[in-house]
Amino acid sequence: MESKAKFIPNPKKRLMDQVREVLRYHHYAYRTEQSYCQWIVRFVKFYESKRHPREMGAPEVQAFLSHLASDRDVAASTQKQALNALVFLYRHVLDQPLAQGMDPRKASRGMRPPTVLTEEEVSRLLDAMEGVHRLMAQLMYGSGLRLMECIRLRVKDLDFGQGQIFVRDGKGGKDRVTILPTQLHHSLKAQLEKVSALHRQDLSEGAGEVYLPLALDRKYPNAGKSFEWQYAFPARKRSIDPRSGKERRHHVMENGLQKAVKRAALATAIPKRISTHTLRHSFATHMLEHGIHIRALQELMGHADVKTTEIYTHVMKKDIKQWISPLDRIVG
């Protein structure tokens, strides 16, 4: 059986243009493209001689990764992301796979216990928010969504009949189903009515197209202008797609919701370090406290390993009074 031919980038292009060409050929997400490009640029700049990566290899990569751990004190996940970017560069762009056996200094910052709000604190935080940002924050807490999963929701992903949300292409490229809170049905339907009106206006102006993943726009040429593919939380203005050059209406920027949560945290004076991800952490912890099986929670959260889900067992509220000390069990 013949192996699939390897994609070779245009050798006449500059290095970073080649990197983007290969990333897009392999259908990497735009945010991953940005992240990988940033790490490759940092790697080149780390060596003041600014040698071309083709002239370097595993020893230089190992030294750079060790620098991140020892001098920059990055988290283990950050160091791994940098490694993935450089492995991609050498394997898929330069066709010079890195030698096996690299052993850079490991980043010591591991996973920390997540910040979790009580149910009363969540209520106070949400009450300090308004408009579409409040709705999005409610959705993150009520469904356990990641920030970008919430931002990228499409009209067709909300199933009111089944009370479900379909999360498409989540972390790790995985799809999953999670809860659609009944309490949000009315607010979400009102939001979709606004989306519909905005979409009709775009269509009347010769626009109305959204980005479709995995080249679906070629397979279904008219799908990008259908209502069901529109973002549930669209941007106020249309913009030029950085890849295709087409004018489209994208989803809202994530920093708007992040800032709204920060403002609400300051207004409520809750003495905890609160971010949008705190809402997802709180969802998981409260679900465990109310008796959900950890394997079911793993599926709702989209965790590849149940060990990731188990971290919430360390921060959930526990009723110690119901437990009996082994000493008290001894009949003396």
Image (cartoon, grey):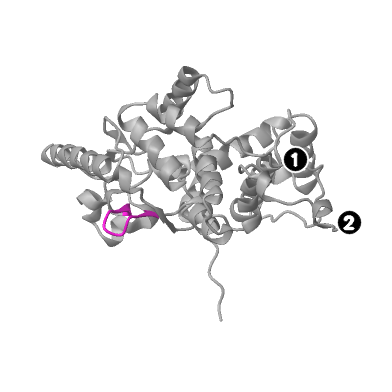
Q: Does the magenta stretch include residue 130?
A: no
Badge 2 is on which residue? 332
Q: In this view, does 12 lie above or below 97?
A: above
Label for residue 126?
Answer: none
Where in the figure is residue 43, as x and y percent of width and height?
Answer: 68, 36
Q: Tell me residue 181's x, y (percent).
A: 36, 48
Instruction: Answer with left or right where residue 146 lies relative to residue 182.
Output: right
Q: In which quarter of the image is the N terminus?
A: bottom right
User: Is residue 176 among what the camera can see?
Assistant: yes
Mark 1 residue crowding within 10 angstroms, few (<14) / some (14–19) / many (20+): many
Looking at the image, which residue is at 54% across and 23% down? 270
Check whether the beta carbons of the residues at disc 1 and disc 2 lie within 8 A of each other.
Answer: no
Residue placed furthest toward the front: 332
Q: Is residue 132 left or right of residue 17?
A: left
Q: Which amino acid does label 1 sit on?
A: Leu
The amino acid type found where label 2 is placed reads Gly
What span is in magenta?
A: 157-166
Please state which of residues 13 and 174 is positioned toward the viewer in this rendering.
174
Q: Is residue 162 magenta?
A: yes
- Residue positioned most to the left: 204
Mark linked to residue 65: 1
Q: Can residue 13 be seen in this view?
A: no
